[in-house]
Image (cartoon, rainbow, N blue to C red):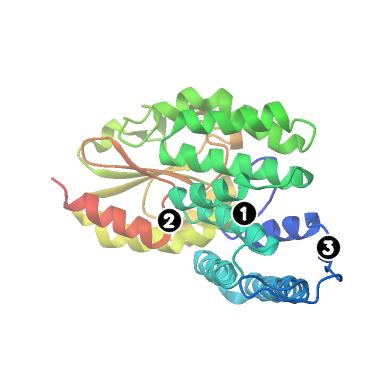
Amino acid sequence: MRKSLLVTLVACMAALLISIACAEKSPAEEPVANKSSGMESSSENSPAQDYESELSSEKAYERVMREIRDIEKSPLAKREPIKAIEKIEGKFRAFIEEYPGSKESHDAMFQLGVLYNHLQKPEKAILHLEKYLSSASDADENKVAFAHYSIAEAYKNAGNFDAAKKHYRIVVDRYASVNTQLLGMARTNLEDMDVIQRLAIGKEPIPFEVTDLNGSSLSLEKYKGKVVLLDFWATWCAPCLQEMPNVKRIYKQYHQQGFEIIGISLDSNRNALEKYVRRNDIKWPQHFDGKAWNNEVAKKYKVRSIPATFLLDRSGKIRYKSVRGSRLAQAVEKLVKEK
């Protein structure tokens, strides 16, 4: 979960983003028919056909939105949020293919770009958000501001930090009065950029030495030569808890092959953490200092949202960031096989 986030859902935030976009959509405008012409061109639609097509795409998009809201409310969204988002992705893609060039497909392009960010597909996010921004209306300034912020996040995740800074600055310079939450988040990312670049894929993590819940020393150096997942989480974070069964399965499967996990808890209640760890039989060590978002390790890593993960290879280099679900399993399997 992100502090002061424009949208509060993390693992399955699609529905709220869609609600924002729907609220900002302008009412459909009827095309003006050319009544003076009684001829229909063989190469292009008549005004009446244009009107029917526009109305058709509008109604079709309303239907897609209803279906997406149903997905968001379904048990799947709570049980497997990533799969729910992938179903939503399919709905948007199908609409764009069926109604290319419509204003609704333009909105769907924006929605897909944001979704791809949360599916950890930055290249696809960039592609769709760039397409959206290339013809976005100034009247949709709130959505345009969010698109710039989202594409900045995608570029950051793809390791193109100059492009990320460019779009964060656009939010700060052009849209400061549009959305103060986005403004604050963009400024924070610009301030954190030195550390973000230092923690890029292929770089070494920032060292730390703390203690676990038992008072034992805990550091990355202790796990040298192992594949290590550095996991920032909390018991109050719903997406973190949704991912925990998957993390436990991966740990059980690959621990004997050299896979370790270091949990960095952003809890403020030690009893709640200890109870959860005990009840769920979590085997790996947990660091807790009771400072929540001001946790010393989290501050070093500029963690602004959770779950946040860094997956290190046996040489101690960062190979993956914020991978979850099946992608985490695949990444761990690959790294434990490397010698």
- Front-lying residue, 93 or 315: 93
Q: Which residue is mark 3?
A: 29
What's under tag 1, amino acid-wise? Phe
**Residue 32 in sight here:** yes
The outermost residue toward the left is 339
Which tag, 3 or 1, sits closer to the chain's start? 3
Q: Which residue in the protein does label 2 denote?
A: 324
Look at 53% across and 52% down and name the residue there. 128
**Would residue 307 appear left or right of 182 to someone viewing this image?**
left
Q: Which residue is mark 1?
A: 110
Dot 1: element: helix
Q: Circle 2: is it few (<14), some (14-19), or many (20+) Cα within 10 Å?
A: many
Residue 310 position (above or below residue 275):
above
Measured as percent of width and height from the top left, residue 229 is found at: 35, 45
26 left or right of 298? right
Residue nearer the viewer, 165 or 338: 165
Q: Earlier in the sequence, mark 2 or mark 1?
A: 1
Seen as rendered, the residue at the extreme right is: 35
Looking at marks 2 and 3 on the same chain, the residue that comes earlier in the sequence is marked by: 3
Residue drawn at x 83%, y 69% is 33
| Callout 2 touching callout 1 (CB < 8 Å) | no
